[in-house]
């Protein structure tokens, strides 16, 4: 089923922020919480510190009316910088790859900041773009490749 959520980026404080949001909304995390160390690193990637391996890769918390906040830690050690424009993303989870590709093509038109759609280790067909109005969009489609 299609879903829209809001994806929040933090610089090492995702767990603290989401613990606060859990208290505010009185809800529980959607399991599992994935840490950066749980994901396979690309070949040739630098060794991560213990703190970086323990950072949040993905956390999800339902808030109101079925809306879900998702979050991740950006890593200073990997050159990530947090600023207005990359701290909040609208995450779309279309039902099909075709719909994902249609939305991605339209929203990424005239964009110079994007990551092309590709199959990811967590099982999604994933990509991201910044639209011409400066809004960041992320796509996660779980329909298998045909």
Image: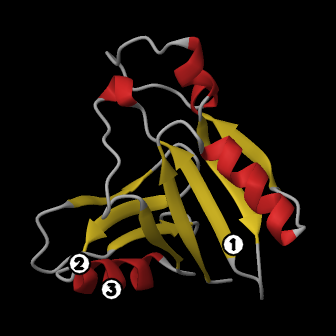
Q: In the picture shown, does residue 75 fall above or below 132?
A: above
Q: Which element carries disc 2, helix, strand or loop?
A: loop
User: How far is disc 2 from disc 1 in space, using C-alphas?
Assistant: 22 Å
Q: In the picture shown, does residue 66 fall above or below 82?
A: below
Marked residue nearer the N-terminal end (2 or 1): 1
Residue at x-position 26% and y-position 82%? 107
Tell us which disc is closer to us: 2 or 3: 2
The quarter of the image holding the N terminus is bottom right
Closer to us: 146 or 5: 5
- Numbered label tally: 3
Q: Quadrant of residue 76?
A: top left
Closer to us: 20 or 112: 20
Q: Which element carries disc 1, helix, strand or loop?
A: strand
**How would you rate the neighbour count of disc 1 (Cα within 10 Å): few for under 14, some for 14-19, many for 20 or more?**
many
Residue at image mark 2: 131
User: How far is disc 2 from disc 3 in space, using C-alphas?
Assistant: 14 Å
Whether pointer 1 and pointer 3 mark residues with C-beta atoms closer than 8 Å, the reply is: no
Q: Position of residue 15 (x, y in %)?
A: 68, 42
Q: Position of residue 3 (x, y in %)?
A: 62, 81
Indicate left or right for 93 with 34 as reference: left
**How would you rate the neighbour count of disc 2 (Cα within 10 Å): few for under 14, some for 14-19, many for 20 or more?**
some
Tell us which disc is closer to us: 1 or 3: 1
Residue at image mark 3: 102
Q: In the picture shown, does residue 142 fall above or below 83?
A: below
**How would you rate the neighbour count of disc 3 (Cα within 10 Å): few for under 14, some for 14-19, many for 20 or more?**
few
Q: Position of residue 52 (x, y in %)?
A: 53, 23
Q: Which element carries disc 3, helix, strand or loop?
A: helix
Residue at image mark 1: 68
Q: Quadrant of residue 111?
A: bottom left
User: Residue 105 bears which disc, if any?
Assistant: none
User: How far is disc 1 from disc 3 in space, using C-alphas?
Assistant: 23 Å
Indicate left or right for 129 with 11 as reference: left
């Amino acid at each position: 089923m299609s879903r829209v959520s809001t994806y929040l980026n933090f610089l090492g404080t995702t767990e603290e922020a989401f613990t606060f949001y859990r208290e505010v909304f009185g809800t529980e995390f959607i399991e599992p919480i994935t840490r950066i160390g749980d994901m396979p690193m690309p070949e040739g990637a630098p060794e991560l510190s213990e703190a970086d391996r323990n950072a949040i890769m993905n956390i999800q918390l339902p808030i109101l009316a079925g809306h879900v906040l998702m979050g991740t830690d950006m890593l200073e050690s990997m050159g990530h910088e947090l600023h207005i424009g990359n701290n909040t993303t609208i995450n779309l989870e279309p039902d099909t790859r075709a719909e994902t590709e249609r939305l991605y093509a339209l929203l990424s038109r005239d964009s110079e900041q994007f990551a092309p759609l590709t199959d990811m280790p967590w099982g999604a067909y994933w990509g991201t773009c910044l639209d011409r109005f400066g809004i960041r969009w992320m796509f996660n489609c779980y329909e298998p490749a045909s």
